[in-house]
Image (cartoon, grey):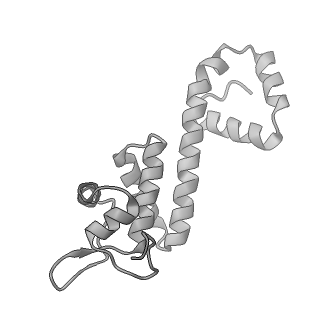
Amino acid sequence: MRNGIAKKGRLYRIGELSELAGISPRTIDYYTGLGLLAPAKRSTGNYRLYDDETLSRIHRIEQLKAQKFTLEEIREQFASLNRVVPDEAVTRKLSELQSHLAQLEREVKELEPVFDQLKPQQAKRLFRTLTPQTAACIEALLLLLGKNNLM
C-alpha cells in the first residue's frame, strides 16, 4: 500500500483494509460476522486476508447505508444477486440498479399522499407533462405498489 492507494491483486490484513476503506476494523469484523464480507483467504499465521473486491464491497455497503438501507436489506440484496449472477462486475451493476429502483420506490411512496389527493383530471395533466419514459417508470412503480388507479 502506498499513499493509501490499493494495488491491484493485493491481499490486505484487516488493519490495512480498514485504513483503505475508511472504516474501523471492528466494523469490518461486524460486516464479516453478518455475512456481508468474507476473507479471500487466510495467511499462514491464520490472519484473515481481504482482496480488492472486498474493498469495493465495503464502499458499496457504505453507499447503500447512506441511502438508508438497513444492513439486513443490504445482506439480502447481496445474497440474491450472488445466487443469480456469479460475475462480480455484473453483480455490482445489478446491485446498483436494484438500489436505484428501491430509492425510486421510496420516493414514490413519499409522494403517495399527494397522488391520493389528486383528482383524475389533475393526475392526467401531471402525467402528460412528464416525459413518456418518466411517466412509464412512475406508472410501473405505482402498479408495483398497488396504486394503479391514478392513470
Q: Quadrant of the N terminus?
A: bottom left
> Is residue 77 visible to us here?
no
Specify whether 88 is left or right of 19.
right
Q: Position of residue 95 (x, y in %)?
A: 51, 57
Q: How many marks do you count on the picture?
A: 0
Nearest the eye: 146 or 132: 132
Residue 27: quarter of image: bottom left
Which residue is at 53% across, 49% downward?
99
Which residue is at 84% across, 30% downward?
129
Q: Position of residue 60 (x, y in %)?
A: 46, 57
Which residue is at 54% across, 35% downward?
106
Task: Name, please, the residue furthest toward the front.
Answer: 3
Residue 75: quarter of image: bottom left
Q: Quadrant of the C terminus?
A: top right
Nearest the eye: 11 or 96: 11
Specify whether 107 is left or right of 33.
right
**23 to 134, vertically: above or below:** below
Nearest the eye: 66 or 76: 66
Which residue is at 38% across, 57% downward?
22
> Is residue 19 visible to us here?
yes
Task: Name, please, the residue furthest toward the left.
Answer: 45
Q: Position of residue 112 (x, y in %)?
A: 60, 23
